[in-house]
Image: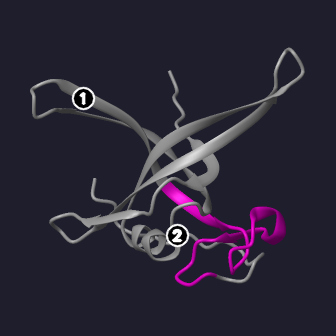
């Protein structure tokens, strides 16, 4: 049986990126993402729900997210679901489903413009002009 694991999300950061380093000095960033969904209820009123997603990224891209993003800013991410499980300090089994970010794009223009005003900017070493083609960066992922 085949399987496919791909996640595409666009939302706003719920907190500033949290940067740390593995023992081999590989950067790791964890972010929280809020994804909103608006819909029409059966009674005709507008409803809204928010999905909060924990995300993680490694390497050079992690350092870029840490440098250029902060709480409240929009981001477009592509990645895969990853299931982590561990034993808590009290001995209980713990688990978390998170998104492992493989690619991301800057959303909106420079100077705090919203996504409706700017468009998107793909990941680069420095923020490129809007509309420049995406060139992926190869980096080592620690697993």
Q: Residue furthest right?
A: 44
Q: Is residue 143 above or below residue 36?
A: below
67 relative position to 28: left or right? right
- For the residue pair 117 and 48, the one nearer the viewer reads as 48
> Residue shown at 63%/51% (left/top)?
11
66 relative position to 48: left or right? left
Q: Tell me residue 70's x, y (percent).
A: 51, 67
Q: Is residue 125 above or below residue 143?
A: below
Instruction: Tell me the residue that label 1 is attached to.
Output: 94
> Residue shown at 15%/65% (left/top)?
23
Q: Tell me residue 66's x, y (percent).
A: 43, 71
- For the residue pair 17 and 24, the one nearer the viewer reads as 17
Mark 2 element type: loop
User: Marks 2/1: CA distance?
Assistant: 29 Å
Structural crowding at the residue carrying mark 1, measured as other residues with C-alpha within 10 Å and reported as few (<14), some (14–19) or many (≥20): few
> Residue shown at 54%/34% (left/top)?
4
Instruction: Tell me the residue that label 2 is attached to.
Output: 69
Residue 143: which numbered mark, if any?
none
Write down the region rendered in magenta. Answer: 102-127
Q: Tell me residue 102's x, y (percent).
A: 49, 56
Mark 1 element type: strand
- For the residue pair 32 and 95, the one nearer the viewer reads as 32
Examine the image and state in which quarter residue 6 appears. Answer: top right
């Amino acid at each position: 049986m085949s399987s496919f694991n791909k996640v595409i999300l666009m939302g706003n950061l719920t907190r500033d990126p949290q940067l740390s380093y593995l023992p081999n000095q590989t950067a790791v960033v964890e972010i929280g993402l809020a994804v909103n969904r608006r819909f029409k209820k059966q009674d005709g009123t507008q409803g809204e729900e928010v999905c909060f997603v924990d995300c993680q990224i490694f390497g050079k891209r992690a350092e870029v997210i840490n440098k250029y993003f902060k709480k409240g800013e929009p981001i477009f991410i592509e990645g895969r679901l990853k299931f982590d499980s561990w034993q808590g300090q009290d001995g209980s089994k713990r688990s978390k489903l998170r998104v492992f970010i493989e690619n991301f794009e800057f959303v909106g223009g420079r100077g705090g413009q919203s996504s409706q005003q700017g468009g998107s900017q793909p990941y680069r070493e420095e923020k490129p002009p809007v509309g420049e083609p995406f060139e992926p960066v190869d980096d080592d992922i620690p697993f």
